[in-house]
């Protein structure tokens, strides 16, 4: 999947706008930053895979596995193979995050925040004023920012994973986007004591 040009992503977002709605900002996550965010998971997957390969070789007496051997040895080799598959799956999360970021478009209008995923099929998550919770800006990996805004209730209702609030992840100039989101939804900065 290729990344969208600014004009292409703008056209996709404009097709989702309601009557009289104005587009204020749109952008895409940085795919390299999204992949880098999963590097620790891939590292752990690599360690698990190396361990599983060693386990399989040790069970086969450092030769080619002979599945005509005892049932106990076949079970050990089968479990090691399953562990290897889990490790390789964890290594693949980097690629999944990269491709998912390529197919994601973020938008802010005068009425709502939009998250559009274009990977396999087009899905649109829309966050209106009642869905906006506390707005947070965070510095992300590789000189990118995160702007989180979805309330916990809206995050569950929209079908987003509970571990991650609705928001714009791995974007450039997140502080400016946070300021625009605060202005649109009248959410001033709050000082915590």
Image (cartoon, rainbow, N blue to C red):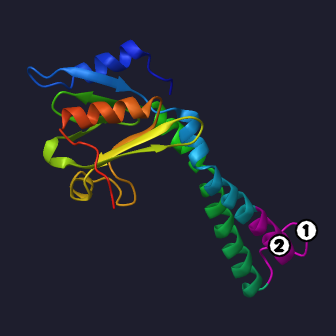
User: In screen coordinates, is 76 left or right of 153?
Assistant: right
Magenta residues span: 50-69
- Residue 18 rendering spot, x and y as whole percentages: 12, 25
Q: Is residue 100 located in the magenta-colored stretch of the structure?
A: no
Q: Nearer the viewer, residue 150 or 135?
A: 135
Q: Is residue 52 located in the magenta-colored stretch of the structure?
A: yes
Q: Which mark is residue 154?
A: none
Image height of 128 relative to 110, above or below: below
Q: Which mark is residue 66?
A: 2
- Residue 117 seen in the current view: no
User: In screen coordinates, is 80 left or right of 133?
Assistant: right
- Residue 41 rendering spot, x and y as whole percentages: 61, 56
Graded by Cα atoms within 10 Å as few (under 14), some (14 to 19) or many (20 or more), the crowding at tag 1 reads few
User: In screen coordinates, is 9 left or right of 23?
Assistant: right
Disc 1 secondary structure class: loop
Residue ID at (8%, 21%): 19
Which residue carries the number 1 mark?
Answer: 63
Q: Quadrant of the C terminus?
A: bottom left
- Residue 3 seen in the current view: yes
Residue ID at (44%, 16%): 5
Disc 2 secondary structure class: loop
């Amino acid at each position: 999947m290729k990344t969208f040009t600014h004009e292409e992503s703008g056209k996709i977002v404009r097709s989702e706008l309601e009557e009289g709605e104005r587009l204020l900002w749109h952008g895409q996550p940085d795919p390299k930053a999204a992949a880098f965010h999963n590097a620790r998971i891939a590292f752990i997957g690599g360690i698990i895979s190396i361990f599983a390969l060693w386990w399989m070789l040790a069970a086969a007496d450092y030769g080619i596995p002979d599945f005509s051997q005892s049932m106990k040895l076949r079970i050990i080799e089968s479990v090691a193979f399953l562990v290897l598959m889990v490790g390789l799956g964890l290594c693949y999360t980097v690629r999944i995050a990269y491709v998912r970021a390529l197919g994601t478009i973020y938008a802010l209008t005068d009425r709502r925040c939009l998250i559009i995923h274009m990977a396999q099929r087009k899905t649109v998550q829309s966050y209106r004023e009642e869905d906006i919770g506390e707005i947070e800006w965070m510095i992300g990996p590789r000189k990118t920012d995160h702007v989180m805004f979805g309330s916990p209730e809206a995050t569950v209702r929209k079908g987003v994973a509970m571990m991650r609030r609705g928001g714009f992840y791995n974007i450039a100039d997140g502080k400016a986007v946070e300021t625009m989101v605060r202005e649109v939804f009248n959410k001033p900065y709050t000082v915590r004591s």
